[in-house]
């Protein structure tokens, strides 16, 4: 019974941490994209914004799963702290990659993503976000 209690406590701690980090990632994405991302998704149903935010959630989830797995033998507080650090790194790298792609490509990337025509740039940015999460997650698996 103690094992169940401990596992439930760990799962709750990691779940709360995950929710906070996904919100932090969304806020960071909102800062690098023009307009209000929240409105673009929930009010305007902008497919580019939805795809980009979804890719970010997938990428960050990969990092969080790898962080939890990597810290299984640590005390709970240390495992949560390490997973937070890995995920904040992933958020920073994702935002940096968005700014870098904006700088390296023609036009304003954020403006292209405001259009609701499923611009290919949105797919590329989304793939990069998932790739960043996969690379950081893989680094934690060794």
Image (tube, rainbow, N blue to C red):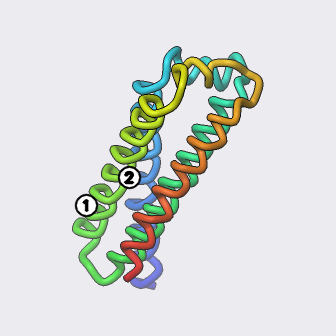
Give the camera-side residue of 49 and 96: 96
| Residue 42 versus residue 82 in the image, above or below | above
Q: Tally the marks.
A: 2
Q: Quadrant of the N terminus?
A: bottom left
Choose between 81 and 77: the one closer to the eye. 81
Report helix, strand or loop for mark 1. Answer: helix
- The secondary structure type at the circle numbered 2 is helix
Q: Can you tell which quarter of the image residue 31 is in?
A: top left
Most extreme residue toward the right is: 117
72 with respect to 138 (left or right):
left
| Residue located at (51% from left, 49% from top) | 129
Q: Earlier in the sequence, mark 2 or mark 1?
A: 1
> Residue 75, position in %: x, y?
24, 75
Image position, residue 102 (x, y; %):
47, 30
Q: Residues within 10 Å of mark 2 (few under 14, many from 20)?
A: many
In the image: residue 59, left or right of residue 32: right
Residue 131 position (above or below residue 25): below
Where residue 14 sits in the image (x, y, percent)?
41, 61
Residue in the image at 53% along x and 49% along y: 128
- Residue bearing mark 1: 81
Q: Pick the quarter of the image with the C terminus.
A: bottom left
Determine which of the numbered discs, if any, sits on residue 54 in the image: none
Which residue is at 65% across, 25% downward?
41
| Mark 2 vs 1: CB contact within 8 A | no
Relative height, residue 87 to residue 103 (above, below): below
What residue is disc 2 on?
90
Residue at 47 percent across and 67 percent down: it is 65
The residue closer to the viewer here, 32 or 6, is: 32
């Amino acid at each position: 019974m103690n094992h169940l209690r401990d596992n439930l406590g760990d799962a709750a701690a990691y779940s709360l941490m995950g929710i906070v980090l996904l919100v932090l990632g969304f806020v960071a994405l909102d800062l690098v994209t023009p307009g209000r991302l929240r409105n673009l998704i929930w009010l305007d149903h902008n497919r580019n914004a939805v795809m980009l935010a979804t890719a970010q959630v997938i990428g960050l989830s990969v990092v969080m799963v790898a962080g939890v797995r990597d810290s299984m033998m640590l005390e709970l507080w240390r495992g949560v702290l390490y997973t937070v650090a890995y995920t904040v790194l992933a958020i920073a790298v994702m935002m940096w990659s968005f700014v870098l792609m904006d700088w390296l490509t023609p036009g304003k990337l954020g403006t292209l993503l405001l259009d609701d025509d499923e611009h290919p740039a949105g797919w590329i940015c989304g793939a990069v976000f998932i790739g960043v999460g996969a690379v950081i997650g893989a680094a934690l698996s060794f």
